[in-house]
Structures are given as structure tokens and as C-alpha cells.
């Protein structure tokens, strides 16, 4: 005699059930039509892929504050605070005034880790702490950073900071501590959760266009189309670092 | 075995059992929330350093998220409320990790960088008005033949 299934005792965890339900929903629709947008986010538990190359486009024409809002958002998101006038406090992103003597223009732009394809900071690191993730995000592995600061000197963008003082109250997604070097992580904790970096969100998200985050390897992504359509620049492209951060509207 | 070494061993055994009988203060790590840890208690006691170390490399270097041996989750689940009913930091001997680490005299370096208490709610929202700017620091940057000055 066969027993009827016992419906009173669920044999699947809630998570497994939801995952299964999601898969069924996806299959139930017509081919190519799913309830979900094509997943930019990779599944939880899988490694970052080199098929993706994360990048930023900063449109200075649409940015009226030189990047100050992005700086404030980064500071709040990642828990760093740089005292006014301090030359030693960590700054993951800062506003930078650039002037061109040739055409007498003065501009202010946000400057941070440019997430280079050929990062000099990774080349010089003696311990392998300075590293580039498969999807192009350049990070410091503070577990192996010995605080030698070679990378601080090697970075042509002045993007790296050193932490001189003991810290408390760090954000759980952005561990930081004395004796290590740090820089913009492209909000890797958000990117891995399929969200945009905090600075991009501060400017209303990629759709607003002042800061656009996306996959430079995908020719159909907004950022790739914008970079291909308009005059855009990488800062110090002559150095061959191939930054992942692009600027539009540099005079 | 000589008589002398037998005597010494006997003395040692007597001495050590004597100390134990007087009661070395044993660590009593507080239980976490929920019904069970991510693995058996005995397994976690012995292996948590390796598990954490393995996962930290996976997460940071490869970008693998969501595995179960997460320091963040340890801290969140095993938080011990202090006198003000907020979770105590690792500076407090009652902190979950310190209960055993003090006993074993093993220094914890994790919290040099990681927070030893769970995130409070403020990190869930972003305050865009927080000051983070100021005039600034040295830079090696010069935009192709442009002069450069820091604003913040």
C-alpha cells in the first residue's frame, strides 16, 4: 500500500521552495520571455566572471557639483570620514579641480580608483594584496596587505589611502583597519547584490546619466553605448592603464 | 622506566589534577540566536578559524557570496547585549569571541578591521548630507598637460 504524501510536514526549506517556484515561473512563460529581467547578477555562490567588465561613465555635463554628492554618498556608505583639510585621512573618492592652460578651462570632477585593466598598484604589490577581480574591480585584500604603500605611490590617480589610526565602528560590508591601504571598491558589496555603487545612486542611478554604471564588455549595455556614441575619455590614457572609469565632458 | 621518572610523572599527574580540582575557570561562550549553528558545535570549535579563512579568500578574491561560514553572521548571531542592551564590542570580555580566546590566550586580529558588533540600522540608509570633502592631498595626477589642484 502506498502512503499519501504528508502535506502537514514541509520537506523543503522555504528557500528551496522559492527557488523552485522561481524556476517553474521562468519556464512557464514563452521562450525568451521571463518574468525576470535578463540576470545581470550572477547566482549567489558563484565566482565573479571575466566575461563582465564593470565600469563607470561620469558625465561632467550633467554633474553640477563636481562630484560632491558622490563623495558624501561614498563616505556614508563605506564609513570613512575625512576631516576637512586633512592630508592623511582616507578618501576613497574626492573632488579634483583640473585646469587646462591651453583653453583656460577649469573643471571639477570626481576622482577615485579608476579600476584599471592594467593596474600599476597590482604590479608593485609585494604580497599580492593589491588585486584585480575577474570582473575588473581592483581591490586590496587587507588580510595580506602589509601597509608598505608601494601601491599608493604607484597609482597615477592618487586613489589609494593609508589608514594611520585604529578604527572602530566599521561597516560590516566595508572592513577597514589601521596599517592597511584602501581605495574605492566600486561598492563591490552592492555590485555583488545586483545594485549600483553608492555614488551612482546619489546621482539618481544610471538612468539619470550623470554617473552610469554597467558592463563595458556588453555592447548592449547603456554604458557601452554611451562610450561608443559620445566623446569620452579615460584619464591619463597615455599611461596604458586602461581605466574602467570613463569621463564625458572633459574640456 | 626509572623510579625517578615514574616519581616525576606521578607528581605531575597529582599536580595537574589538583589544579583542575580547584577549578580552572572554564569559558562559557554564550549561545547564538536560533536553534542551531551553521555546523555542529564541536566542529565549529575546532575548525572555525580555517572555515573563516577559507571563505574570506573566496569572498574577497573570487567574489563568491552567500556561503555559510561568514564572520558577519557569527557576529550577528552571537551578539551579547551589554548593560545598555546594545551588543558589546570585542573590547568587552563578555564578547562571544573573547570568552574562549581569553581563556586560550589566542589573540583575535579579525576585529582590527571587521566590526565586532552587528550593523545598526543607520547603514541601511544612505545619508547624502554627510561631510566627506575637504581640501586635500598630494596627487601624482596630471591630466595630459593640465595643471591640477585638489578641491576635496
Image (cartoon, rainbow, N blue to C red):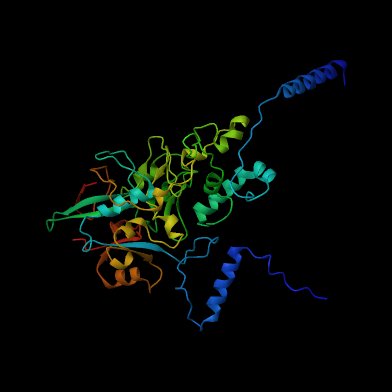
Q: Give the tally of numbered discs.
A: 0
User: Residue A89: image x %, image y %?
Assistant: 32, 40
User: Residue A23: image x %, image y %?
Assistant: 56, 73
* B109 w.r.t. A236: above or below: above
Whether residue B142 sits left or right of residue A173 in the image: it is left
* A117 w.r.t. B16: above or below: below
The residue shown at (52%, 37%) is B109
Task: Residue at the far left: name it.
Answer: A104
Q: Quadrant of residue A199?
A: bottom left
The residue shown at (38%, 35%) is A165
Task: Residue at the far bottom: name it.
Answer: A30
Whether residue B70 sits left or right of residue A155 in the image: it is right
User: Residue A31: image x %, image y %?
Assistant: 51, 83
* B92 w.r.t. A118: above or below: above
Residue A129 versus residue B49: which sits nearer the camera?
A: B49
Assign the N terminus of chain B to one quadrant of the image.
Answer: top right
User: Residue A224: image x %, image y %?
Assistant: 34, 70
Amino acid at each position: 500500500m502506498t502512503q499519501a504524501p504528508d502535506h502537514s510536514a514541509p520537506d523543503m526549506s522555504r528557500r528551496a521552495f522559492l527557488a523552485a517556484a522561481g524556476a517553474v515561473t521562468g519556464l512557464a512563460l514563452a521562450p525568451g520571455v521571463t518574468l525576470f529581467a535578463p540576470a545581470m547578477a550572477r547566482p549567489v555562490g558563484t565566482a565573479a566572471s571575466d566575461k563582465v567588465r564593470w565600469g563607470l561613465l561620469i558625465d561632467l555635463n550633467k554633474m553640477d557639483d563636481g562630484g560632491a554628492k558622490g563623495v558624501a554618498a561614498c563616505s556614508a556608505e563605506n564609513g570613512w570620514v575625512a576631516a576637512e583639510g586633512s592630508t592623511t585621512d582616507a578618501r576613497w573618492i574626492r573632488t579634483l579641480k583640473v585646469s587646462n592652460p591651453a583653453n583656460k578651462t577649469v573643471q571639477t570632477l570626481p576622482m577615485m580608483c579608476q579600476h584599471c585593466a592594467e593596474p600599476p598598484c597590482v604590479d608593485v604589490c609585494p604580497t599580492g594584496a593589491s588585486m584585480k577581480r575577474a570582473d575588473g574591480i581592483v581591490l586590496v585584500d587587507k588580510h595580506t596587505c602589509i601597509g608598505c604603500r608601494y601601491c599608493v605611490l604607484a597609482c597615477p590617480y592618487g586613489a589609494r589611502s593609508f589608514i594611520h589610526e585604529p578604527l572602530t565602528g566599521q561597516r560590516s560590508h566595508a572592513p577597514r583597519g589601521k596599517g592597511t591601504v584602501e581605495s574605492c571598491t566600486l561598492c563591490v558589496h552592492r555590485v555583488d547584490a545586483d545594485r549600483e555603487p553608492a555614488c551612482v545612486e546619489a546621482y539618481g542611478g544610471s538612468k539619470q546619466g550623470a554617473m552610469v554604471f554597467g558592463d563595458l564588455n556588453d555592447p548592449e549595455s547603456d554604458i557601452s553605448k554611451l562610450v561608443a556614441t559620445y566623446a569620452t575619455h579615460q584619464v591619463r590614457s597615455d599611461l596604458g592603464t586602461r581605466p574602467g572609469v570613463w569621463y564625458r565632458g572633459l574640456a | 622506566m626509572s623510579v625517578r621518572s615514574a616519581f616525576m610523572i606521578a607528581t605531575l599527574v597529582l599536580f595537574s589534577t589538583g589544579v583542575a580540582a580547584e577549578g580552572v575557570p572554564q569559558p562559557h561562550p554564550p549561545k547564538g540566536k536560533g536553534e542551531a549553528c551553521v555546523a555542529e558545535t564541536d566542529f565549529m570549535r575546532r575548525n572555525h578559524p580555517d572555515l573563516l579563512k577559507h571563505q574570506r579568500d573566496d569572498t574577497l578574491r573570487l567574489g563568491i557570496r552567500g556561503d555559510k561560514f561568514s564572520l558577519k553572521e557569527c557576529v550577528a548571531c552571537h551578539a551579547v547585549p551589554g548593560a545598555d542592551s546594545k551588543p558589546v564590542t570585542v573590547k568587552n570580555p563578555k564578547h562571544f569571541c573573547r570568552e574562549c580566546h581569553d581563556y586560550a590566550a589566542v589573540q583575535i586580529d579579525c576585529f582590527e578591521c571587521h566590526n565586532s558588533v552587528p550593523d545598526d540600522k543607520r547603514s541601511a540608509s544612505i545619508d547624502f548630507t554627510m561631510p566627506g570633502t575637504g581640501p586635500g592631498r598630494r596627487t601624482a595626477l596630471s591630466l595630459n598637460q593640465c595643471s591640477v589642484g585638489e578641491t576635496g
